[in-house]
Amino acid sequence: MVMSKWYKYASPVNLYPLANRMIPWFAIPAAILLIAGIYVGLFVAPTDFQQGDVYRVLFVHVPAAWMGMLLYILMALYAAIGWAWNARAASMMASSLSVTGALFTFLSLITGGLWGKPTWGTWWVWDARTTSTLILLFLYIGFISLQSAIDDQRRADRAGAVLAVVGVINVPIIYFSVQWWNTLHQGATIRIASVTTTMAAPMLVAWLIMLAACWLYSVAVVLSRLCCIIGEREQMEALR
Amino acid sequence: MLETSHLKCVRGNRTIFRDVSFAVRPGDCFRLTGPNGSGKTSLLRMLCGLLSPTFGTIHWHGTNIQTLGEEYFSAIAYLGHRPGIKDELTALENLRASCGLAGIQISKQTAAAALERMGLGGRMNLPARFLSEGERRRAAIARLAVGRSSLWLLDEVLTSLDRTAVESIQLLIEDHLAIGGMAIVATHQELKLSAGQSRRIELAA
Amino acid sequence: MKSASYFVMFRWLLWREVVLAWRRKSDVLSMLAFFVIIASLFPLGMDPDSRLLRTIAPGVVWVSALLASILGLGRLFASDFADGTLEQLMITPQPLILIVTGKILAQWLVTGVPLVLISPLLGLQFDLAPGGTRMLAVSLLTGIPVLNLIGAIGSALTLGIRSGGLIVTLIVLPLCVPVLVFGAGGNLSLVGAVLALTLVFAPWAAAAALKISVE
């Protein structure tokens, strides 16, 4: 059966060489697309009528925010699989995803500030999207700290899974509550006008290229970290 | 009847024990021995359902205990390293509360009688923090006397006990075995039971 | 009869928790003191203009209640874990979810209700009108159970970990944002909705977390 061929990769020892081989297939296209995306974003896309050249930061900011969100859901999924089926490899994937996801979320907050300062004069705006992204970062931090505080690996994997599943269920509620909070306090905050009302084709192209680059980069980096994690843990098990 | 098959325990990065199989029938008493760190506590916790084995199965009357869930819990009684006594409650309150939490209501008289049997006659109305280590342990053991479990899982239950207390516990276990109960006792000390001797499960390091 | 034994169990669980809290009043009293102190610090950190205070009152009281509830989590599972009673609770022939729900209910009775009862005092400190104080108390009454429920999950996940108290805070606070926002914002129906949802999921998650932590 085709499935049985893939089952062997559920064992981290077998997964390691596969993951290792896959990395360059993602890292090299990621680098190429990153360069292409930066080129299109900086040089080909036209200067925006309203915002000048500052908006180009969004080519990093928006993909980073999306990746932060996406990777959290993936992380929760892998963690849940690792917990339900006692699959160590899946739990390792979740731990690997957590760091990349947190970094992307952090990056989106920083680039958001870089955009906000010239646009409205403030580094931080308490609007719905930014605040939700901040809370997402806290969720990542909670997951990572919980796992690093628990010595027993199996318990750390499963505890993280419970937290990730609870978190993933909470995310839409958190998002909704922050939206609600934002509309409640309209006067104090600045509304972010939609930036995408009329997008010139090169802008859209740049965005898509950057998103693809982030995605490929994530896969490469997550697999690379996964190999490190496998190496660390399996080495300890080999001492048994 | 309890049956285990090829139990393996891995904690952290160490295999604590592997391929442990045995069967316990009504009237059996097993003495669990082995050096420190050989996994006696882990084995008992597996038999309680608190720890899932890395490999192997545990069957109660032919059914896997993980499938049985609460039904299995009503058949077992476990005394671990920590006596399971709340310091702010008296020995009497502790006993009635433990039974109550298991869904069994016992009267003050029944509880008092059990505690007296364990030698806590005069001290059962003191908050447990005023009791010595041995007295607390005896208060915990009183739970076995009033419970209706068939399988007793006891971890180092004889520590901190003087000779009289050890004798009353041995008597307790004997009575339990006589009515068809089973016991697995992890202990360094010898168990002197009048009706036949206890069998041994030795866990090598 | 199963339901009869559930009833016996619940009764004894609540009795035990209340008696333990009563005989160790310092646990609860220090948490309440913390609540008042934290809330009182805010005006000290700024210009205590009464209009400003009235505006920030719901938020400040809610954040203080949140922090105080987290502080009170130690008595939920950690003390039972330390003396071996938690293990015993987990091998009773009662569904663990029921036991967890009972413990959380007791936690609310013993720590949550006093917080609600003290909140009018804070309302006075912040010069809230009686209507505002009432609204705040009601929102706390409906919302603190959510804090207890989510806190139970965090507490169960961090049993026996060194610096567990700090990790509990990191885990629980982001998850409490919705109830904080709705509670301080005064929307009771939304708080109620979050409570209903949390009631469904949290006991299950906390029970699962206990099994993981006790292994």
Image (cartoon, coloured by chain):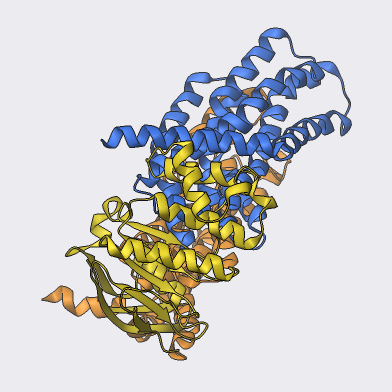
Front-most of residues B100 and A116: B100
State the image coordinates of residue B30 (x, y, percent, origin top left).
34, 75
Which quadrant of the figure has residue A78? Answer: bottom left
* Res. A63 visible in picture: no
User: Which colour represents chain A?
Assistant: orange
Front-most of residues B186 and A222: B186
User: Which colour represents chain C?
Assistant: blue
Is B33 situated above or below B170? below
Image point (55%, 28%), residue name: C143
State the image coordinates of residue B55 (x, y, percent, origin top left).
30, 76
Which quadrant of the figure has residue B45? Answer: bottom left
Please identify the residue farthest to the left as the structure is shown: A1
Q: Quadrant of the N terminus of chain A?
A: bottom left
Q: Quadrant of the C terminus of chain A?
A: bottom left
Image point (70%, 40%), residue name: C27
* Res. A143 visible in picture: yes
Front-most of residues A227 and A62: A227
Is C86 situated above or below C59? below
User: Which colour represents chain B?
Assistant: yellow
State the image coordinates of residue B68 (x, y, percent, origin top left).
24, 55
State the image coordinates of residue B122 (x, y, percent, origin top left).
62, 47
